Image: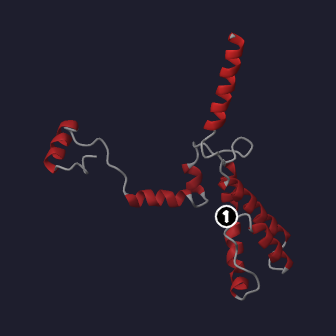
Amino acid sequence: MLRNYPNRFAAGLVRALAFPFGLPYAAPSDALGSAIAELMQTPGESRDRLLADSYVPRVSIDPIGYGELAFALMPRVALLEQRLRQAIRHGRIEPVPQSFADLPEWNEAAQQRGLIDEDERKVLDDYARYGAEVVKVDDFPADFGLLADLQRRKEMLDKAMELAA
């Protein structure tokens, strides 16, 4: 906040009054933040240590847990995509769809053409299912149910008026 203060002199004065002994900590650099983000997105010991005391949801409790299941399949999916790159380049099959909803159909076509086996198809189908669950969002009415709430309230008031009469 003090860096963006419009008057530099006033900002320096407020900083000196608010923090007479200097700032109690130094903010981490962007490079450090980027390095940690990279570690969080890469399977391995470092990620496991960073998540050791963190909440990692299970699917049975929280649907966000599908993200961890999809994350666990990412290395195998990446290898399959890399292996199929030549077949895609040579026109033997369409590029891998970006939509999770279209992936099962693409998986079936790839298996029928002999590009993937049953185990690889299961991995891709699971990845599509988990990914679809991760990106699923709640659907709310445009008025967030306000009209229905007002109608219920009116009905309750009408009933109360009838009982009072």
Farthest-out residue, top: 165
- Residue 80 position (above or below residue 18): below
- In the rendered image, residue 122, in percent from the top left (x then y), is placed at 81, 64
Residue at image coords 16%, 49%: 7
Quadrant assignment, res 162: top right
- In the rendered image, residue 69, in percent from the top left (x then y), is placed at 70, 55
Q: According to the image, label 1 marks what residue? A: 74
Residue at image coords 66%, 31%: 151
Quadrant assignment, res 164: top right
Q: Which of the two residues, 2 or 65, is positioned nearer the viewer here?
A: 2
Q: Which of the two residues, 19 or 164, is positioned nearer the viewer here?
A: 164
Q: Secondary structure at mark 1?
A: helix
- How many numbered circles are shown? 1
Farthest-out residue, left: 9
- In the rendered image, residue 91, in percent from the top left (x then y), is placed at 73, 87
Q: Which of the two residues, 46 or 140, is positioned nearer the viewer here?
A: 140
